[in-house]
Image (cartoon, helix red, strand yellow):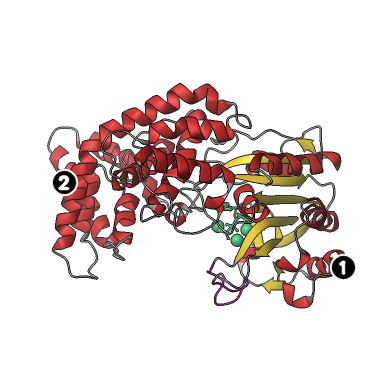
Amino acid sequence: MTSSNDIRATFLDYFARNGHEIVPSAPLVPRNDPTLMFVNSGMVPFKNVFTGQERRDYLRATSAQKCVRAGGKHNDLDNVGYTARHHTFFEMLGNFSFGDYFKEQAITHAWTLLTRDFALPKDRLLVTVYHSDDEAASLWRKIAGLPEDRIIRIKTDDNFWRMADIGPCGPSSEIFYDHGPHIAGGPPGSPEEDGDRFIEIWNLVFMQYVEDAAKTLTPLPRPSIDTGMGLERFAAIMQGKHDNYDTDTLRALILASAEASGTDPDGPHKTSHRVIADHLRATAFVIADGVLPSNEGRGYVLRRIMRRAMRHAHMLGQRDPFIYRLVPALIRQMGVAYPELPRAEPLIVETLKLEESKFATMLERGLALLDDEVARLGATAPLPGAVAFKLYDTFGFPLDLTEDALREQNRTLDRPGFDTAMAEQRARARAAWAGSGDAATETIWFDLKETLGASEFLGYSMEDSDATIT
Ligand code: ATP
Ligand code: MG
Ligand code: MG
Ligand code: MG
């Protein structure tokens, strides 16, 4: 079996042999972009190189980049544990050309690596291109010999990439693997595409324009390449699995969770083990890169992930701190590739243990309250917003934790009601201040508090933007 560690090495080695500089993963906290919560793709550390603001002494690079998608524009948190292919933390393998080679070579490299070095069967692969990108379509025909029906033209922005509202952009091409007709789902662009049969493994971005404020596209004199392949999704294929969670790294964590809790890894607690395995990785890597749980910004994203995992540990019957016990298993799997993990081990263990023990009582009491409230509702009635707010405000339940708990009963919560309860509480806080003295100062204080988001609400208030830090 090809291990995840071997796949990472083979990928980097292929591109190094083809003139690419191997660049180590940047930390998860972006250095060059204060508007971004966490690095969420391989190109983030190279943003300024693509825009020309920064020069490096190489024109081609390759990396295995740590990524987190648990907030902002790319938020996969709600999928984790439930789909075969999403994680909050994952590794993105990539190759980059900074004004050096372009479309033809990018496609050639991807195809050669997949079908020659990794020996994937050609008839399992299909690709998408942006509907107007005839050049990419004909290159896929020429280089890969793909028939017309496996070069799918997509009209949506899924196949047109933009760095931001203005700046570098261009069409993209996504490579999919067909896991076979025994799995539900249709090809990309079809009505059934939400299934897990066809899984996107690699995304090639052809950065060939700059866009201005009037949305005019001007061709770049020296176009660039940015690609990203999910290591876990690719490992699933290479290891003959359909599900990322059945690959070596994640399976080892699931088994550790099952063993430590004395439960069946594949029984009724399956989802909990998956969520714990995923969230353990995200937690450990985020802490190793210097973030601690808190009530705002990055620290709150971390706290949400940790608390969400804790509810699943509770479902496994664990009433004492549990997740911290799984850290050694993670370090066995990933500590060689990421030495920051063993270096930060004591901090990761202590932070988890402390956070787990601090939240235990509130979790227990909040879950009891939730059970009581749900018992009074009709089978399909959403949880009232006021209850979700009480759980949030009094018991420290992040909104997504409550949603995750309700999901098992196919129940939703009244989000507008939650927002109203939140707004009312803010208004009460404001009123409590009124008359205490200097009105102007108070206004400034509350305005600041609301714009800076000095509350736990920050983590939710800007879901449509990556600019989650203000
Ligand atoms: P999807 O459509 O499946 O959500 P995406 O188009 O959002 O994926 P990209 O932004 O193109 O993903 O990222 C490049 C690659 O990184 C993807 O092709 C996939 O292999 C991998 N990837 C993206 N998101 C995740 C995730 N949450 N967990 C694991 N791998 C991921
Ligand atoms: Mg996505
Ligand atoms: Mg996609
Ligand atoms: Mg993609």
Q: What range is drawn magenta here?
A: 184-195
Q: Main secondary structure of the magenta part?
A: loop
Q: Residue at x 81, y 43 (%)?
A: 14
The amino acid at mark 2 is Arg
Q: Is residue 51 visible?
A: no
Q: Secondary structure at mark 1?
A: helix
Q: Locate residue 373, reporting x and y percent.
A: 15, 58
**Residue at coordinates 29% horizontally, 53% vertically from top-left?**
402
**Residue 232 tag number:** none
Q: State which quarter of the image contains the C terminus.
A: top left
Q: Amino acid at mark 1?
A: Lys
On whether ligand 4 comes within 8 Å of the CB at mark 1, the answer is: no
User: Within the magenta stretch, is there residue 466?
Assistant: no
208 versus 289 height, above or below: below
- Which label's residue is closer to the chain start, 2 or 1? 1
User: Residue drawn 22% across and 51% down?
Assistant: 389
Q: Which residue is mark 1?
A: 142
**Residue 98 occupies quadrant:** top right
Q: How many marks?
A: 2
Q: Whereabouts is ligand 4, in terms of quadrant?
A: bottom right
* 95 lies above or below 58: below
Query: Which quadrant of the view contains residue 180?
Result: bottom right
- Cα separation, mark 2 vs mark 1, equals 66 Å
Which numbered disc, 2 or 1, marks the residue closer to the eye?
Answer: 1
Instruction: Judge left or right: residue 247 versus residue 56.
Output: left
Residue 109 in the image: state x and y as whole percent. Answer: 82, 53
Q: Dot 2 corresponds to which residue?
A: 428
Nearest the viewer among 61 and 229 is 229
Circles 2 and 1, Cβ within 8 Å, touching? The answer is no
| Residue 186, position as x, y percentages in the image | 59, 74
> Residue 381, percent across and down?
22, 69
Mark 1 packing: few (<14 Cα in 10 Å), some, or many (20+)?
Answer: few
